[in-house]
């Protein structure tokens, strides 16, 4: 695990966005990324959008959420809605395609097989990068403490947020780990301490640290 420490979130955003753009620009046959939702990463997506629009690259990019709340796209809680709002300029250049974790099913439990089929067809190879956040409880994506990190051999699984009871669809831990690189974006002392103390524990982030075959780059600021 490599820590990259920044004095503030705008410096973190600039460094990660530039690294991200380089991957896109140097992957002409197409790159793919799994993106975290939540409140932290939006400025990174917005900055990438600016860089992508100005770079003129037409290299194809595929995106998928690491997890999605089972709400309508218009709902402020929707991660895919967040990505569409943040990446609206580059979308105009048709430089990215969003593979949705949702369908019209009434619940993630009902949708799991269909979404797994979609992911297997549209995202068959390891991701170029997975951008993860982390909750103060050590959850990643919608893999929560004490809950399963996978369902059979599917690439996704239904989950429920332990506090809000919100239905979620999450990529499984094995699918998240099938990537060339992992970027873990966290802020503040509390999350840093959770991460520093995690390795031998049973939190979802601990499983990520132990099972990752690629380097995990932690982007952190106070
Ligand atoms: C989500 C995210 C989730 C998030 C963490 C941290 O859908 O909420 O994918 O895993 O990364 O909960 O969220 P914050 O960045 O808001 O602290």
Image (cartoon, helix red, strand yellow):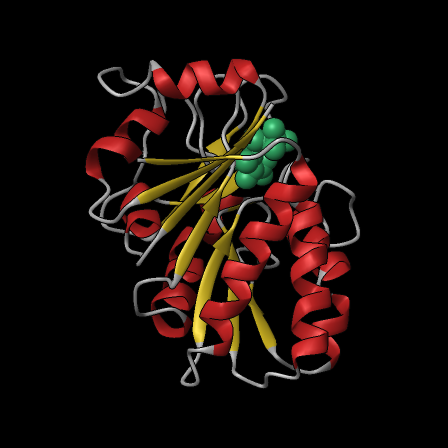
Q: Is residue 63 above or below residue 28?
A: above
Can you give x and y, in whole percent of width and height, for residue 8 in the image? Answer: 66, 33
Residue 69, visible in the rendered structure: no
Q: Is residue 205 above or below residue 98?
A: above
Name which residue lies at 62% across and 31% down: 7
Can you give x and y, in whole percent of width and height, for residue 22 in the image? Answer: 49, 69
Name which residue lies at 42% across and 67% down: 118
Q: Quadrant of ligand 1?
A: top right
Can you give x and y, in whole percent of width and height, for residue 203 in the image? Answer: 34, 20
Question: In terms of depth relative to the viewer, which is nearer, 165 or 98?
Answer: 98
Name which residue lies at 44% across and 85% down: 28
Name which residue lies at 64% across and 37% down: 38
Position of 2 compared to 153: left or right? Answer: right
Q: Is residue 120 above or below residue 75?
A: below
Residue 142, visible in the rendered structure: yes
Q: Is residue 123 above or below residue 159?
A: below
């Amino acid at each position: 695990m490599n820590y990259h420490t920044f004095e503030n979130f705008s410096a973190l955003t600039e460094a990660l966005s530039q690294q991200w753009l380089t991957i896109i620009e140097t992957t002409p046959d197409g790159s793919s990324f799994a993106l975290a939702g939540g409140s932290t990463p939006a400025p990174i997506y917005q900055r990438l959008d600016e860089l992508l629009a100005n770079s003129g690259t037409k290299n194809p990019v595929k995106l998928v959420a690491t997890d999605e709340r089972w709400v309508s796209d218009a709902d402020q809680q929707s991660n895919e809605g967040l990505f569409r709002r943040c990446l609206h300029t580059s979308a105009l250049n048709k430089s990215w395609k969003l593979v949705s974790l949702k369908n019209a099913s009434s619940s993630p439990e009902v949708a799991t097989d269909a979404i797994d089929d979609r992911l297997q067809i549209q995202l068959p190879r390891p991701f170029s990068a997975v951008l993860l956040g982390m909750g103060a409880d050590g959850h990643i994506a919608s893999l929560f403490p004490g809950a399963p990190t996978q369902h059979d051999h599917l690439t996704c699984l239904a989950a429920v947020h332990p506090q809000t009871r919100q239905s979620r669809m999450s990529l499984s831990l094995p699918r998240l780990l099938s990537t060339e690189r992992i970027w873990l974006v966290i802020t503040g002392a509390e999350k840093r301490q959770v991460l520093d103390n995690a390795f031998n524990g049973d939190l979802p982030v601990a499983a990520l640290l132990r099972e990752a075959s690629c380097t995990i780059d932690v982007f952190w600021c106070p």
